Amino acid sequence: MQFDIRDAGLSAEGRLRIEWADRQMPVLSTIRERFAAEKPLAGLRLGACLHVTTETANLARTLQAGGCDVFLCASNPLSTQDDVAAALVEDFGIPTFAIRGEDRDTYYGHIHAILDAEPNLTMDDGCDVVSTLHAERPEQAAQVIGGSEETTTGVIRLRAMAEDNALKYPMIAVNDAATKHLFDNRYGTGQSTIDGLIRATNILLAGKKVVVCGYGQCGRGVATRARGHGAHVIVTEVDPLRALEATMDGYEVMPIGEAAAVGDIFVTVTGDIRVISWEHMEQMKDGAILANSGHFDVEIAVHADPRKPDAPTLDKLAVGRRLMRNSLEEFTLADGRKLYLAGDGRLVNLAAAEGHPASVMDMSFANQALVAEYLARNGRDLAPGVYDVPTEIDRAVARLKLESMGIRIDALTEEQQAYLTSWQHGT
């Protein structure tokens, strides 16, 4: 078995943490039991590019129980938990290619290692496997039945590929399932982002002005949790509907150009590039803290962009840099002001903390497992394109989650069902 991990000797610690996470993931455990009996993925090879965490390990175990060969690499250089990667290899026999802090060449080398396995199914968090396959190995697309995408940024990329008629096989947008984005994005990102920010800085949020850039489901979650800690939350947006919603939710809304001068802490959650540019940083207070919770490290203009090599960035214009704490770097500017960057501008909830709680990833990864089963059965009949998660899968995940929590709900009577599906009743 080929693999590339930091230290196989970490496996015992990793296995314990995987088992602990599994206790918080009853829906996925239920699916794993059924998969072990039915083997719906038998004979398939699945290439996954995901955050290599305890929760992902339990998804990989579930897919493996379903009968397929799983090959896993990291979807972010700073999200890998090295002990988990070791346990996946040593205890579960899953070829894993992930090392925390790996450089760009290693990162893409690991993606190619996954593609070398010639997967029939792909599973992405950020679309890097799909985009690499299409750009560099288009001949392999014919053997892929279908794939799934975990995060907003990846779905945006996939829809762009579909719009350009470049997508060669069907992809299901797991991110857009209600039991994913309404819970994982809002509750998971909200809690884990604040967790990462506090771990990186040990700062008191109460009384601070926290600027949340973006008011999608992730931004809503971060804003809610920051306000819960006593922060004064300011929201920046480009979408008038979301800006209006943020206003109605009680947040102050203003352009980033204005917020830059008054904010104490800035968190980007947009999925777009250069949301906070050097021009904004020039206006920031001495001691301002910057963090990103979007998938890629492009939302804050920290590092040079090869597409715009002359654009001003924080690392080029700072006159001094120091690592103040784990995951917190100080940048001294020419005028003496100091700005602080958490998690190197990467996903702060994974770079400085442990990512989403297992109980919320239970639903997201239950969707991933059931979508893999759906693609195994139906993918060959689907044309290339981006598809929603089938409603029956979304509802099944919600039902299983409620059952695991001991919560019962009502069911429509025949009379109520007839009323809702007819037009003859009138008023």
Image: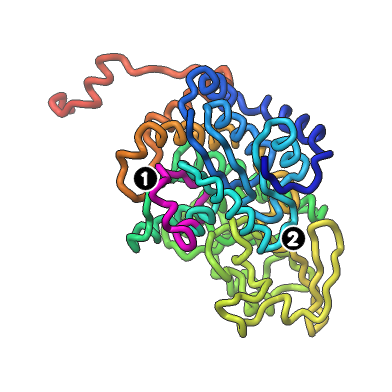
Instruction: Classify residue 375 by image quadrant.
Output: top left
Residue 354, given in percent of the width and then of the height, sits at 72, 44
Name the residue rendered at 79%, 84% in the picture: 334
Q: In the rendered image, is residue 195 in sight?
A: no
Measured in 3D between alpha carbons, the distance from the residue under mark 2 to the one under mark 1, in whole angstroms, is 35 Å
Q: Nearer the viewer, residue 275 or 134?
A: 134
Q: In this view of the protein, which residue sits in the foreground, 238 or 132?
A: 132
**SS category of the residue bearing label 2:** strand
53 vs 410: above or below? below
Q: Nearer the viewer, residue 51 or 193?
A: 51
**In the rendered structure, which segment of residues is drawn in magenta?**
133-153
* Lower position in the chain sequence, tag 2 or tag 1: 2
Query: Which residue carries the number 2 mark?
Result: 342
Task: Decide: few, some or many residues near mark 2? Use Cα within 10 Å; few <14, some 14-19, many ≥20.
Answer: many
Does residue 209 show up? Answer: yes
Q: Residues within 10 Å of mark 1 (few under 14, many from 20)?
A: some
Residue 190 in the image: x percent, y percent?
62, 46
Q: Badge 1 is on which residue?
A: 387
Q: Of helix, strand and loop, which one carries label 1?
A: strand
Which marked residue is nearer to the observer: mark 2 or mark 1? Answer: 1
Left or right: where 389 falls relative to 7:
left
Q: Position of residue 371 (x, y in %)?
A: 45, 35
Q: Compared with residue 160, is residue 186 higher up or lower down, i.e. above or below? A: above
Q: Quadrant of the N terminus?
A: top right
Q: Amino acid at mark 2?
A: Ala
Residue at 65%, 76% in the rendered image: 304
